[in-house]
Amino acid sequence: MNNDCGVKNMKSGMILVLIALVSGAASRCIAFAEPSLQGVGRGPISLPRDPELEQQSRHSLEVARYYFYKRKPSKDDKAGLERLNKAVEGRLQEILDLNPTFGKADEVYFLLGEVYLRGSNFEDAAKSFNRVVKESPDSQFAGDARKRLSEIEAQGKVRKEG
């Protein structure tokens, strides 16, 4: 009795298993490399954020929020309001310059738009609000940003971006 036939079948079966494993691994590698094949609910892979820089940015945002909402000069003090707006704007710009991938960038851009709006700088306000709407459409600030944009456009201060 010749046993070569059983060995040949076993070898061809192992080859088929290896081919299946390799092709399966290759398709997983392709799916991992191609963001559109990642599936629902998975965004693009990004580098982890620097925790120290995030903490510093959060602190700067808290300070900017405090000065924007709590510190109000008297209504007659236009120079005081202008100084306050410049201080808040500087703090927010510093966050964006030092940490462009900040986890709360949507809030930074929204608050920056509010500062520009309060200072009657409608063009820059519209740019900031547009950035919130386009880059963070699911943000809690997106609805308010859309509302501010439509108010600015309704007043004819800027033309609608398309």
Image (cartoon, grey):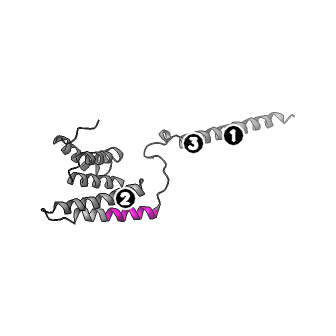
What quarter of the picture does the C terminus occupy? top left
Tag 3 near tag 1, CB within 8 Å: no
Q: Nearer the viewer, mark 3 or mark 1?
A: 3
Q: In the image, residue 19 lies at what x, y percent?
A: 67, 37
**SS of the residue under disc 1:** helix
| Label 2 – label 1 distance at C-alpha | 55 Å
Instruction: Tell me which amino acid carries mark 2.
Output: Glu
Instruction: Tell me which amino acid carries mark 1.
Output: Leu
Residue displayed at 12% across by 62% down: 76
Which residue does the numbered mark 1 point to in the structure image?
Answer: 18
Q: In the image, residue 43 lies at what x, y percent?
A: 44, 46
Which residue does the numbered mark 2 point to in the structure image?
Answer: 94
Q: Nearer the viewer, mark 2 or mark 1?
A: 2
Q: Which residues are magenta?
A: 51-62
First reached walking from the N terminus: tag 2 or tag 1: 1
Rendered position, 104 above or below 63: above
Rendered position, 55 above or below 121: below
